[in-house]
Amino acid sequence: MLFLNLYIIIDMINHKSKLICPHCSHEKTITMPSTFCQYFLECTNCKTVIKAKAGDCCVFCSYGDIKCPPIQKN
Ligand SMILES: [Zn+2]
């Protein structure tokens, strides 16, 4: 039963975030890594390297519609 409960907790975390590029407003749904924070991400449209804002742990917290998995857990 413990194993089953663990699965439910994992399912509650959303791993997909819609990222909006601050340079060209290009929207892209990206699967977030759960093991590390993605601080830099290259926009597939304008090739600008998107950097997380000061105080944010990753680009998803700064520009995504959903916060990163470690933040969702807290
Ligand atoms: Zn862009």
Image (tube, rainbow, N blue to C red):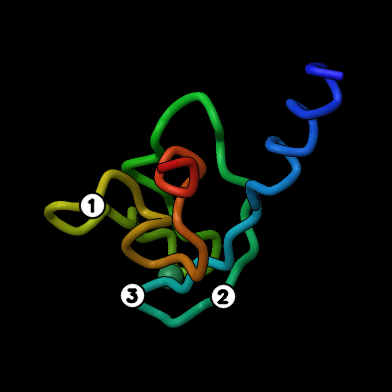
Amino acid type, residue under disc 1 in the picture: Asp
Q: Which residue is mark 2?
A: 27
- Tell me where residue 47 sits by quadrant: bottom left
> Three-letter amino acid code at disc 2?
Glu
Would you name the residue on which mark 1 appears? 56
Q: Secondary structure at mark 3?
A: loop
Task: Give whichever of discs 1 and 2 has the lower sequence position.
Answer: 2
Q: Nearer the viewer, residue 49 or 55?
A: 55
Residue 19, horizontal then vertical, whole percent: 50, 66
* Identity, as a three-letter code, of the amino acid under mark 3: Pro
Classify 10 Å Cα crowding around label 2: few (below 14), some (14-19), many (20 and above).
Answer: some
Badge 3 vs badge 1, beta-carbon distance below 8 Å: no
Q: Is residue 45 left or right of residue 46?
A: right
**Quarter of the figure with residue 5:** top right
For disc 3, does the CB lie below 8 Å from ligand 1? yes
Q: Label 3, on which residue?
A: 22
**Secondary structure of the residue carrying numbered label 1:** loop
How many angstroms separate mark 1 from mark 2 (CA)?
20 Å
